[in-house]
Amino acid sequence: MRSIKHTSQHGFTLIEVLIAFVILSFGLLGAVALQAKAKQASFDSMQRAAAVALGNDMIQRMRANDRVGVITQYNGTFNSDTPLQQSRTCYTNTCNSGQIAALDRQQWIRAIQARENTGALDDATVCINNQRDAASGSNAYTLQVVISWEGRQEFTAIGDTAAIKCGAANNKRRVVVLNSFLYLRTS
């Protein structure tokens, strides 16, 4: 008679496979959560870069239109809901400094209208405050541009940021403040 040899089989049991699957699932969930956080951080970074670029554009345009009596025409507050006035006068004709200031303002309003797909900042507010710096001379001005917008995530602002009065004061508000200095031409 022949004897039957028992060979032992090597392999994974069902329990081992299930444990490996659970460990793999937790790893994949962690990677997906990390990807979502990276996407949010990238979006916040893009908004902050857009705000800084817009603020720098504002300051440079004020520097280019540096006539006495015009610099304070830039002062004021506007937001994403401010209506546009479609004036094309400065595109086809020569404009004075006041008309250029009005055109600059309209271009900035268009730049912050994210809901109209022309800007990158959601629910943005811009506050411009140019003041004469008496200590430095009659043609010296300090320029301040504050841009606030609504981010996607809530956070608690520090005291200095919370004290800024531009835009809605809530836990989603983001703020960029740019300060500069300008000597105006006399003519």
Image (spheres, grey):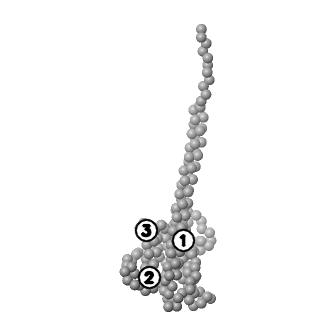
In the rendered image, residue 142, in percent from the top left (x then y), is placed at 57, 83
Q: Amino acid at mark 1?
A: Val
Find disc 1 in the rendering and name its residue: 52
For residue 26, the mark is: none
Q: Nearer the viewer, residue 165 or 180?
A: 180
- The image quadrant of residue 181 is bottom right
Circle 2 crowding by C-alpha within 10 Å: few under 14, some 14–19, many from 20: some
Find disc 2 in the rendering and name its residue: 100
Disc with the residue nearer the chain's start (3 vs 1): 1
Q: State the CA–CA distance, disc 2 to disc 1.
A: 22 Å
In the rendered image, residue 169, in percent from the top left (x then y), is placed at 54, 70
Disc with the residue nearer the chain's start (3 vs 2): 2
Q: Amino acid at mark 3?
A: Thr
CB within 8 Å, label 3 to label 2: no
Q: Nearer the viewer, residue 1 or 124?
A: 1
Any part of residue 170 in sight: no
Q: Nearer the viewer, residue 96 or 169?
A: 96
CB within 8 Å, label 3 to label 1: no
The local secondary structure at tag 2 comes to helix
Q: State the CA–CA distance, disc 3 to disc 1.
A: 16 Å
Residue at screen point 59% across, 74% down: 163
Relative vertical location of residue 128 with respect to residue 172 in this rendering, above or below:
below
Find disc 3 in the rendering and name its residue: 118
In the rendered image, residue 178, in percent from the top left (x then y), is placed at 57, 75
The local secondary structure at tag 3 comes to loop
Q: State the CA–CA distance, disc 3 to disc 2.
A: 21 Å
